[in-house]
Amino acid sequence: MPGGLATHTRHCGAFRKQRLVGAAVREWRYVNVPDVLKRSRAYLPMNEETRSELVVPLFYKGRIIGVLDLEHTRTHFFTEDHERVLTTLAAQVAIAIENARLYQAVRTQERQLSGTLPWRARCNCGCCRQNRRERDPARRWAKRLQTD
């Protein structure tokens, strides 16, 4: 995207081999490279137009779960303000990702547990039986016909 930001979130296993991203992971901090062409040894190009890059790790409970890798076509684009804002944003993104993982785990566990319960397991207390009767569509229809 010429003149704009290209944002990538990469999973840990996929980015270990990349030098800038790997450095951010190893050092547990953001890496801001004002001119990627001057660091050719440490830079593996994903986009030929990239001139500056900012890599921010996503931390959650003492582990890195991903990175935000931002690229720009201008050299020296990313400032200290970008670093501060993206570090704060990265913390919120990490929480959101972990919440999504936890939600998915709960949904999976619910599906597994529902397969082990007897089909149509119901409570048979008087209150629940009364509620089932009231919600039964056939009974509601018959009640309407009686009132007309």
Image (cartoon, rainbow, N blue to C red):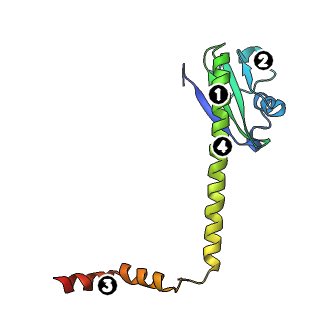
- In what element is the residue under mark 3? helix
| Residue 68: percent from left, percent from top | 67, 33
Measure the C-alpha gap from mark 3 to mark 1: 58 Å
Q: Name the residue that disc number 2 marks.
A: 39
Q: Which residue is mark 4?
A: 95
Mark 3 or 1: in front is 3
Q: Which circle's residue, 3 or 2, is located before the other in the chain?
A: 2
Snapshot quadrant of residue 115: bottom right
| x, y percent for residue 113 | 64, 73
Amino acid at dot 1 = Leu
Quadrant where the N terminus sits is top right
Is the Cβ of the residue at disc 1 closer than 8 Å to that at disc 2?
A: no
- Mark yes or no: residue 47 visible: no
The answer to which quarter of the image holds residue 133 is bottom left
Give yes or no for contact between labels 3 and 1 (Cβ–Cβ under 8 Å): no
Q: Earlier in the sequence, mark 3 or mark 1?
A: 1
Residues 103 and 141: in front is: 141
User: Which of the 4 quarters of the picture holds residue 94?
Assistant: top right
Q: Which mark is residue 58?
A: none
Q: Residue at x 46, y 82 (%)?
A: 127
Residue 86's disc is: 1
Report how far apart the C-alphas of labels 2 and 4 lie in the structure.
32 Å
Q: Of marks 1 and 4, which one's residue comes earlier in the chain?
A: 1
Residues packed near mark 4 inside 10 Å, few (<14), some (14 to 19) or many (20 plus): some
Q: Quadrant of the C terminus?
A: bottom left
| Earlier-in-chain disc, 1 versus 2 | 2
Which residue type carries mark 2? Arg
Chain-order first, disc 3 or disc 4: 4
Tell me how far mark 1 sits from mark 2, CA to CA: 22 Å
Q: Could you give the CA–CA distance between mark 3 and mark 4, rounded to whole angstroms? A: 47 Å
